[in-house]
Image (spheres, rainbow, N blue to C red):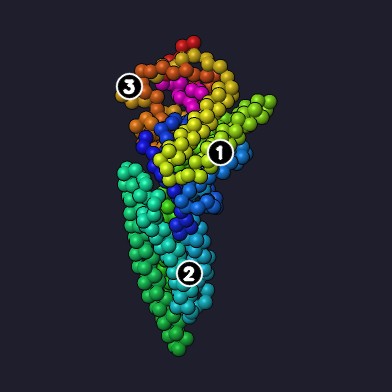
Amino acid sequence: MKNYKHVSKNINGMKLAAVASAAVMLAPVAMTSVSSFAAGYTSDYTNYPVFQLVPYQTALNAGTNGQIGDPYIGFNTSDVTSAIAAVDAINTGADQGNYIDQTSTLKKASDVTTQAASDLVAGLKNGKADSWYAQLTAANKKAADVNIATISSKKSAIDTQVSKAYNALWGAATAADSAVTADNANPTQTNDALVQTTAANYASAVTTFKNAIQNYTSLTTAVTNYSNAIARKTNNGAVQEAAQNAAVAISKLPAADQPAAKASFLKIQGDYITATTNNNANFGGAAAVKAMDAAAATAVKALNDLADSNYDKSTSKQVGVAKVNYNPNYGIQIWTKDGKPVRYNSVEAAATGHKNGDAKKLPGGKSYKVFNATYTANGTTYYNLGGDQYIDAAYVTVTK
């Protein structure tokens, strides 16, 4: 796979590092869209950010919780989330005759939300002018363009919904205040009824307006998904993900076997840090970039080998060979023990011609080793392929 220069720069609270990851297979893991990004890199943006050693427990927690890729990459969506919550927390309707003032309070809070959302989208658009975008592959540029355009369109659509809801809210507030004023001047049964009706209409308009503001949550979700996609495209992200997978494997070992495995786990990361730090010294040269990509590929392979060997210990010996009884043009799904489909990550996808996130399947008509970690759940038996990978026994024939 073609190598590209690595960069990192702070863009509107965002840290990005873009690189086409080396085509080395990552151990299968079930990835989700969970995002838990930490503070950004501290290195100068002209340097590829130095990998931070991932402690065993940190990697285990991340792997168990489904975090993916590089945890130092991501857009900060907290301003939008906090602003949404602030609007939702505003209490209205209790003070009759003061509806316009209440609406003004809602408007000020909603303006903060809209501005935070605008800043978030601006960060995505401004990023296209930075060096990380220029160094993406053509396919990744196209994907980034589509993501940014989709997120921008989503934000515009939500803005329109909010504006429409606010206009209706203002109209309801004006009508409700006018009804209260008229009833105070001339308290009749008709005017009393109008006060109740307009108050109910105002309450309904407030709900509609707050729901429109809540739609910005879908924007933050889209941005987080975009961040996750970028996080999968970095060398550091590939090493991070492999470390998480290895930690999960080590955790399944008997206690006596864990110390040696943990020592290897830390040494592999240390070697990668040394290699990338050394090559940062003369960053910009093609040789340095190539060396850093090679170092990442070496670290990923070593961590995957560590995971595979430890999974073998935890699942014990081979118990037979399973032939897949299925159409050769299709395949059967590979599952994790907790029932999630195993999927290709970006490195595996690039090496095998699949798309990132595609479900992993075993082609029909072929045979595979199975191990003794067989288990039964809800009346279905699952054979172990090694690691946290299982297939439905109904679709295979096992020979000893």
Q: In the displayed structure, would residue 134 be above or below residue 327?
A: below
Q: State yes or no: discs 3 and 2 in contact (Cβ < 8 Å).
A: no
Q: Residue at x 40, y 28 (%)?
A: 361
Q: Three-letter amino acid code at disc 1? A: Thr
Q: Residue at x 45, y 89 (%)?
A: 185
What span is colored magenta in the figure? Answer: 384-395
Q: Nearer the viewer, residue 292 or 196?
A: 292
Q: Residues within 10 Å of mark 2 (few under 14, many from 20)?
A: some
- The tag earlier along the polypeptide, 1 or 3, is 1
Q: In the displayed structure, would residue 256 be above or below residue 397?
A: below
Task: Residue 262: tell me if it is visible.
Answer: yes
Q: Residue at x 48, y 69 (%)?
A: 109
Q: In the displayed structure, would residue 368 be above or below residue 138?
A: above
Secondary structure, mark 1, is: helix
Q: Residue at x 66, y 29 (%)?
A: 259
Q: Nearer the viewer, mark 1 or mark 3?
A: 1
Q: Is residue 28 left or right of residue 52?
A: left
Q: Three-letter amino acid code at disc 2? A: Ala
Q: Which residue is mark 3?
A: 327
Q: Which mark is residue 344?
A: none
Secondary structure, mark 2, is: helix
Magenta residue check for 334? no
Spot occupied by residue 126 in the image (x, y as percentages of width and height): 38, 58
Magenta residue check for 393? yes
Q: Is residue 301 left or right of residue 1?
A: right
Q: Which residue is mark 2?
A: 109
- Farthest residue, direction right: 256
Give me the C-alpha separation between circle 1 and circle 3. 48 Å
Q: Which residue is mark 1?
A: 274
The quadrant the N terminus occupies is top left
- The tag earlier along the polypeptide, 2 or 1, is 2
Give me the C-alpha separation between circle 2 and circle 1. 49 Å
